[in-house]
Image (cartoon, rainbow, N blue to C red):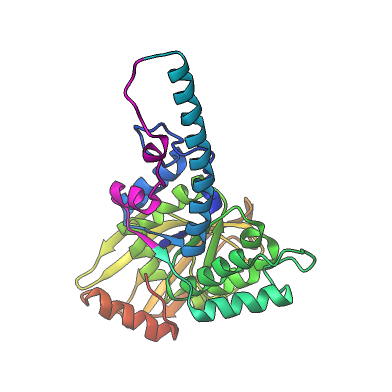
């Protein structure tokens, strides 16, 4: 699981939003970083977003230097004895990446490929989704971030894009986000909620459900054939001799038309099949159709005694995709 964070989420209104002693990260970003460190979720900051963030911080630096210089003049005018200081040496450009890494999070700068630039240029020139057709600005920076996020999501299950930019969360990107398996969120609070997916039990549920999901979609669930949960709660497992024999959990997802889907799920592993039961199915709080799905699916040939890479290869073979957990 990974979270791609846009620069606008950092809200840099001053260099030290929590006070110089507490560091440069806002309360929300610090909470996000601490939770990602705890759950092992990777934070990815696009290079273009980092450059934009550094530009904003440079502007704030100039204001701080001017402020300190004016204070120094006033102190000198009043003849107050104090330690001499150079405002330009005191105020430096914050290192966002290092500040987040010092908390213990796995933070990576996401660089665009040449193909990303070409795709973003094509969309900008043609005013193609997720850009708004009538907008005068070509939004090239935001389009580069969008193209990278979709690329990462296609090969990494459980990818979130945290951004307030309408190019990223607007309706014109909905279909492509769904097809790519990209989950779009606008607030840190929503991501903190979703980080429960980084727990070991949630990862196990995702491993079990991923090969079963396309069959469930073909039985009428309103989703694309990629398992992209919003939340997994109260997961319980019963271990068999060689692998899991039963699993029960509560599942929350967002449907293709942006509605909230919830269901209690039970998996029972038989010799040749998996008995899948979805009960109390609700969409936006209302019972969906008759409220349940009960179906048997041919058991995936995945042995839990295998190592992680072998299990991942088996899942990829079943899906015919290049997904990573």
Q: Please give the count of numbered marks on the rendered protein.
A: 0
Q: Establish if 111 lies above or below 105.
A: below
Instruction: Give the camera-side residue of 102 and 252.
Output: 102
Q: Position of residue 187 (x, y in %)?
A: 54, 48
Residue 272 seen in the figure: no
- The quadrant of the rendering that contains the N terminus is bottom left
Residue 279 seen in the figure: yes
Q: Position of residue 214 (x, y in %)?
A: 50, 77
Picture quadrant where residue 320 is located:
bottom left
Query: Does the segment drawn in magenta span residue 291?
Result: no
In the image, what residue occupies the spot 48% across and 70% down?
153
**Residue 116 horizontal side relative to residue 38, left or right:** right
Q: Residue furthest right?
A: 134
- The quadrant of the rendering that contains the C terminus is bottom left
Instruction: Give the camera-side residue of 213 and 104.
Output: 104
Instruction: Give the camera-side residue of 98 and 151.
Output: 98
Query: Does the segment drawn in magenta span residue 95?
Result: yes
In the image, what residue occupies the spot 44% across and 65% down?
158
**Residue 234 horizontal side relative to residue 48, left or right:** left
Picture quadrant where residue 207 is located:
bottom left
Q: Position of residue 155 (x, y in %)?
A: 44, 76
Instruction: Write the start and end of the magenta stretch as one range.
Output: 81-108
In the image, what residue occupies the spot 58% across and 80% down?
118
Q: Position of residue 248 (x, y in %)?
A: 38, 59
Instruction: Give the camera-side residue of 242 and 178.
Output: 178
């Amino acid at each position: 699981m990974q979270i791609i964070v846009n620069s606008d989420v950092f809200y840099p209104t001053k260099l030290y939003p929590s006070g110089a002693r507490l560091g440069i990260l806002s309360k929300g970003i610090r909470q996000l970083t601490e939770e990602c460190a705890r759950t092992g979720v990777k934070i990815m900051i696009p290079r273009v977003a980092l450059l934009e963030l550094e530009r904003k911080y440079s502007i704030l630096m100039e204001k701080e230097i001017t402020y300190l210089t004016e204070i120094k003049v006033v102190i000198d005018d009043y003849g107050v004895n104090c330690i001499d200081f150079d405002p330009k040496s005191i105020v430096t450009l914050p290192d966002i990446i290092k500040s987040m890494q010092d908390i213990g999070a796995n933070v990576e700068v996401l660089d665009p490929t040449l193909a990303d630039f070409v795709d973003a240029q094509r969309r900008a020139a043609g005013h193609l989704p997720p850009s708004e057709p009538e907008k005068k600005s070509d939004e090239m920076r935001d389009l580069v971030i969008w193209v990278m996020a979709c690329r990462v999501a296609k090969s990494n299950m459980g990818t979130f894009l945290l951004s307030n930019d309408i190019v990223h969360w607007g309706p014109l990107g909905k279909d492509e986000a769904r097809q790519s398996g990209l989950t779009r969120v606008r607030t840190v609070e929503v991501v903190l909620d979703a980080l429960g997916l980084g727990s070991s039990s949630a990862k196990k549920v995702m491993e079990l459900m991923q090969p079963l999901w396309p069959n469930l979609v073909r039985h009428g669930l309103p989703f694309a054939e990629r398992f992209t949960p919003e939340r997994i709660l109260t997961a319980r497992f019963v271990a068999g001799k060689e692998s899991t024999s039963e699993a029960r959990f509560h599942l929350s997802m967002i449907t293709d038309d942006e509605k909230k889907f919830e269901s209690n799920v039970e998996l029972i592993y038989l010799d040749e099949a998996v008995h899948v039961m979805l009960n109390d199915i609700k969409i936006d709080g209302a019972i969906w159709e008759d409220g349940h799905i009960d179906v048997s699916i041919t058991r995936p040939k995945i042995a839990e005694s295998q190592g992680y890479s072998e299990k991942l290869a088996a899942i990829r073979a079943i899906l015919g995709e290049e997904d990573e957990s």
